[in-house]
Image (spheres, helix red, strand yellow):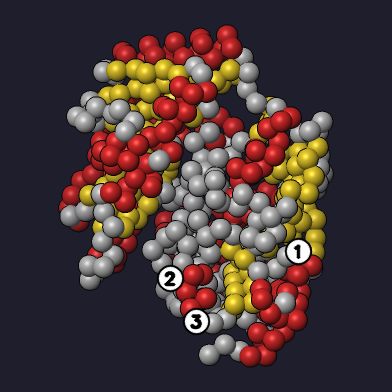
Amino acid sequence: MPNSSLIRDLSRVVGRRWVLHEPEDLLVYEYDATIERGLPEAVVLPYNANQVSQVVRIARRHNAPVTARGAGTGLSGGAIPCDGGIVIVTSRMNRILEVDAGNRIAVVEPGVINQDITDAVAPHGLYFAPDPSSQKVCTIGGNVAENAGGPHCLRYGTTTNHVLGLEIVTPEGDLVWLGGKTADPPGYDLTGLVVGSEGTICIVTKVIVRLMDCPQSTVTLLAIFDEVDQASHAVSAIIGQGIVPAALEMMDRNTMRAVEEAVQAGYPPDAGAVLLIEVDGLEEETREQADSVRAVCEELGARELRIGFSAEDRERLWAGRKGALGALGRLAPSYYILDGVVPRSKLPAVLRGVYEACDSFGFQVANVFHAGDGNLHPNVMFDERVPGATQRVLDLGEVIMRLCVEAGGTITGEHGVGYEKRNYMSWIFSEDDLEVMAGVKLAFGATDLFNPGKIFPSSKGCGEVSSRMKAAIAKVGPDAYV
């Protein structure tokens, strides 16, 4: 049963309408885009930063866990309230507060949809570079929390490269500004520390984003290959030529089959893989790079190359990639999307290992991913209604993540660690490393009640203080939370 005193206190701050606590309302907030679940005690939808601050203070008084949530499109369980408590949803904080075209910045609230930033600044010849596949629905606050990427982050970097400043609410409920409207301020880069911290040390309430000039020219190429290995070798060869495309994406046969049924992109049914390559910049530069990319792909066995110069032609070439994840529902009722990174040169071997692992577990897999930076996204097809299927898929996911790490890669490129991959952190960080990270949480005044159960390895329940946090507290002393 919900804590009536807690509900009453929250309602005084944001209004009764914006506090949800009935079971049928809470069900909507028990999951994000992963397959994990966790039911909150209450959901609060504040309108501004001051209300977020007051909600955090109330949670602290009631010793209630706090989990921030944007649009719920996260893919690592970061927004799952795995220990119940309060979910603070920022979707009502959706205002673009300032556009400064001269200085190429904008100030936005965390509930602003990623695509809406580009739409708002497009009349000035500007855009916001990070472009997650969910950019039409995901929010900038979630992008900041997870350091989201996207197809065009190969050349332009992830969210952290496009955030200049942040207004945050600390675990004590204080409003603090980090960074500002100019690049490279003196002192510690606390803005960079917060980006990618997954809501474990603060809640972001305003974001100063860096905007970019729209490129003069853009060319998109679609290279069709008979085999995944051929396409994988082409990825390394293109980068080896000194060309860093704006985007370099790959889709395998299973993905293409689903996409073809959904959007009729014209992929040959017997093709093994396609590369979608985009170059941009000055017109002379893009034409020259497009010719070089074409030559590399032909040399490595591409059976067909399609090229788009106009916006309409490029949109047609991108249609399959942009519709890929939605189309996978044609292959199975459920899918589990993974997020691992490997060196580009290891793509052929790791992809072979992924297919072999999925075969051994008896699951079909569809690969669609950011090949240029080695960011793999195997999508494991299954039916969660089949008893035991979900656990077997999670076990398979661990095997695939091991393949990435053993190849010299890591466990996430853009989806974050969250709840899903927290126990994999010890594969790539030592006990001392993790203890230092826990110490950073303490420096912000964050206990394990602030987005509990995320990032840090633990065999304990979500609400129990992790061993790393206990060690960090022991070093700092009894005033660690003050």
Image vertical order of residue 293 relative to residue 138, above or below: above
Instruction: Tell us which disc is closer to us: 2 or 1.
Output: 1
Determine the CA span between mark 1 and mark 3: 26 Å
Residue 35 sits in quarter: bottom left
Kind of residue sitting beneath label 2: Arg
Residue drawn at 26 percent across, 68 percent down: 385
Residue drawn at 78 percent across, 53 percent down: 178
Q: Earlier in the sequence, mark 2 or mark 1?
A: 2
| Residue 464 horizontal/vertical position (percent) | 52, 79
Which mark is on residue 37? Answer: 2
Horizontal side of residue 181 vs 399, given as left or right: right
Foreground pick, 337 / 9: 9
Foreground pick, 463 / 265: 265
Q: Earlier in the sequence, mark 1 or mark 3?
A: 3
Kind of residue sitting beneath label 1: Asn
Q: Earlier in the sequence, mark 3 or mark 2?
A: 3
